[in-house]
Image (cartoon, rainbow, N blue to C red):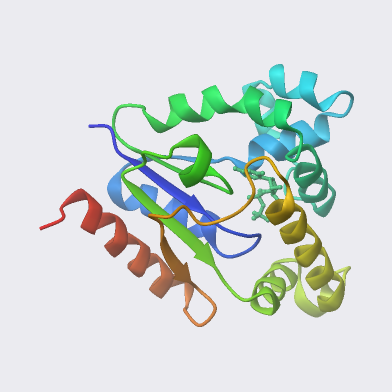
Amino acid sequence: MRFTVAIDGPAAAGKGTIARAVAAHFGFAHLDTGLLYRAVGMKGGDPVAAARALAEADLSRPDLRSHAASDAASRVAAIPEVRTALVEFQRDFARQEGGAVLDGRDIGTVICPAAEAKLFVTARPEIRARRRWLEAGGDASPESLDEILAQVNARDARDTNRPDAPLRPAEDAVTLDTSDLSIDDAVVRAIEIVKARIDPR
Ligand code: CDP
């Protein structure tokens, strides 16, 4: 069976956790496409050459979750040739036998416009910044909540305003606002949305 779940949305909306849980629930493979852009951003040198030469090992660098990697990712992600170099890998992953979940910014709009299920996972910026801050240790975090909010807003603005594959919901995506949901409730809701597309009776 081939079945693609496309999950898009802004930074720290809960896409990754939801995508992993949906994949585990249905037994689908999962690809966090942000890792591709993070790896290209952290490789240094010419980003287009880095994207064309991207290898499996680049995706297991330990520093890909750092703020430096998020920032570098959203910069290289605005370069059309970088995005083009990563399209085929993502499409092959999406159409593999057994089903696939991909999370990112342009999965439902550009990479897999024919995906069987599309979710746009979002939350208010203050809530998303607070989640990132808590993940980084809360009061023990090296950055204040305000600094993290500014970073989240800057990255959202860059992702939303770039001309090539900007962040926006696909017309046929179901929006899931996780601002006032626990992660468990958000996961249950996401699974229901996907289930309705697998078995629309
Ligand atoms: O986890 P978080 O939402 O903070 O970031 P991510 O999904 O790892 O993505 C990091 C950056 O890569 C984003 O800010 C985007 O600029 C870029 N990206 C993209 O352009 N297209 C994707 N499909 C995935 C990520």
Identify which residue is drawn at 67% across, 34% down: 60
Q: Which image quadrant for residue 14?
A: bottom right
Asked whether 174 or 132 is in front, the reply is 174
Depicted 58 relative to depicted 18: above or below: above
Position of residue 56 measured from the top left corner of the image (x, y, whole percent) = 62, 24
Q: Which image quadrant for residue 139?
A: bottom right
Depicted 42 relative to depicted 183: above or below: above
Position of residue 171 measured from the top left corner of the image (x, y, whole percent) = 43, 55
Q: Residue furthest left?
A: 201
Position of residue 183 measured from the top left corner of the image (x, y, whole percent) = 47, 71
Depicted 136 relative to depicted 54: above or below: below
Counting every numbered tag in the picture gives 0
Q: Quadrant of the N terminus?
A: top left
Identify which residue is drawn at 67% across, 24% down: 57
Position of residue 107 measured from the top left corner of the image (x, y, whole percent) = 50, 43
Can I make out residue 63 in this image?
A: no
Identify which residue is drawn at 37% across, 29% down: 95
